[in-house]
Image (cartoon, grey):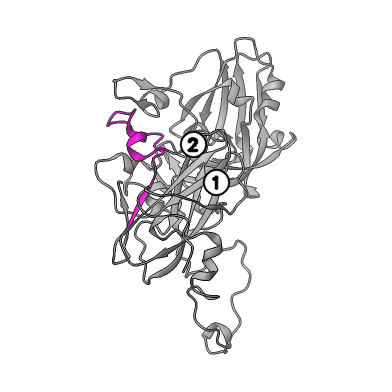
Amino acid sequence: MADFSAGGGILNRRALLKASGVGLAAGFLAPAQAEEEWMTRAGESPGKYGAQSAFADLSRERVGGHEFGAGAGSSSTPLQKLNGTITPNSLHFERHHSGIPAINPDRHSLTIVGAVKRPLRFSYEDLHAYPMETYVYFLECSGNSYRNTLASPANVTAGALSGLVSCAEWTGVPLHYLLDEAGLESSAGWVIGEGADAAALTRSVPMKYMLDNAMLAMYQNGEPIRPSQGYPMRLFLPGCEGNISVKWLQRLKVQNTPAYTRDETSKYTDLLKDGTAEMFSLRMEVKSLITSPSGKMQLNRKGVYEISGLAWSGEGAISKVEVSADGGKTWAEAVLQSEPKSLALTRFRIPWQWSGAPAVLQSRATDNRGNIQPTRSAALQRYSRAGFYHYNGIQSWQVTALGEVKNAFA
């Protein structure tokens, strides 16, 4: 008999190899034979830039399935098709308010003005003379998982539901170097970042964030950031809602108050049940998501599966992820397979033996500051029905007796 660490078939690690002997789901090994076409002739020559396999079928999916205006909209990372924690540049989620500008870096510059002693202008080349630093950080849209705030569960994939989050290695110039050089006046309490796209997205950022770990990001996963991520440079505020990491950054204005711009009054505010709105709630809260098994997947056999997913927190590092297969009645602690890093995605895994009976899979994350991911009902408690930003409730995947996996509200 396998050893179970929770109800619903969740196994402990020692039980995994006992469950089905050495081969959990594989067939017997047969000698390789040169019968397939790819084993009988030379393959393609190296190209200038690597491409995915034609059989991998990796692509982003438009969120909402429609445009919000000329060039506006968003597309999500296919979380259910990826593993590990780093998102390939070509699959990093996107959110645009007026399309992707084609900016010539030789004609682009960054200016720092306002409550500073020395207004400055930096060319793209100038910025490469400053010390750069490299960190792995997640980035999440404040509207990620918004479909789970609606009246009924959307029957979509994990990526279509919660794929407005990605994780990458970001390299750039820490903002404090540039602000120190400009010389902050005593009244400097906020920095207003402005993008160079047609929408000129503009957001107010408290100075404490700018002097902490904000950076002027210029490289992503080792290569220059792509146009869809703000080439030639973007503001990057780790752990905060994605829209304040202004892309195509062209100006930083230092002043003593927020600007209350169009982008932070008409949207990107949290509407509360009492009719008021909470502004500048910038940190993304602790959250997790099972990516496999997940929405639109099909379990084709009874037996052992690996439950795997991602966890993250804008307040620090993930310290624990628990998994349930019975809708939250019992929980077992998953293995944090990747080293938990502050403000980065963490991969968790745990074995599960499916008997063929209906099940409800859930994950619950805790960060190193003691914040615990809430249930869906608790996550919705503070907000009005019109509010959908910063949703971080526990995700439930219903597994039917036929092995179909669907989004569910539990």
Q: Secondary structure at mark 2?
A: helix
The verdict on residue 56 being magenta is no
Q: Secondary structure at mark 1?
A: loop
Main secondary structure of the magenta stretch: loop
Q: Describe residue 106's horizontal placement relative to residue 274 as left or right.
A: right
Does residue 55 sit above or below 397 in this rendering?
below
Q: Is residue 321 visible?
A: yes
**Residue 187 on image: x %, y %:** 60, 10
**Residue 286 on image: x %, y %:** 48, 38
Most distant residue in the front direction: 1
Q: Which residues are magenta?
A: 374-399
The three-letter amino acid code for the residue at tag 1 is Leu
Q: From the viewer's side, name the closer residue of 378 and 214.
A: 378
Name the residue tied to disc 2: 242
Q: Residue at x 37, y 35 (%)?
A: 379
The three-letter amino acid code for the residue at tag 2 is Gly
Q: Is residue 52 visible?
A: no
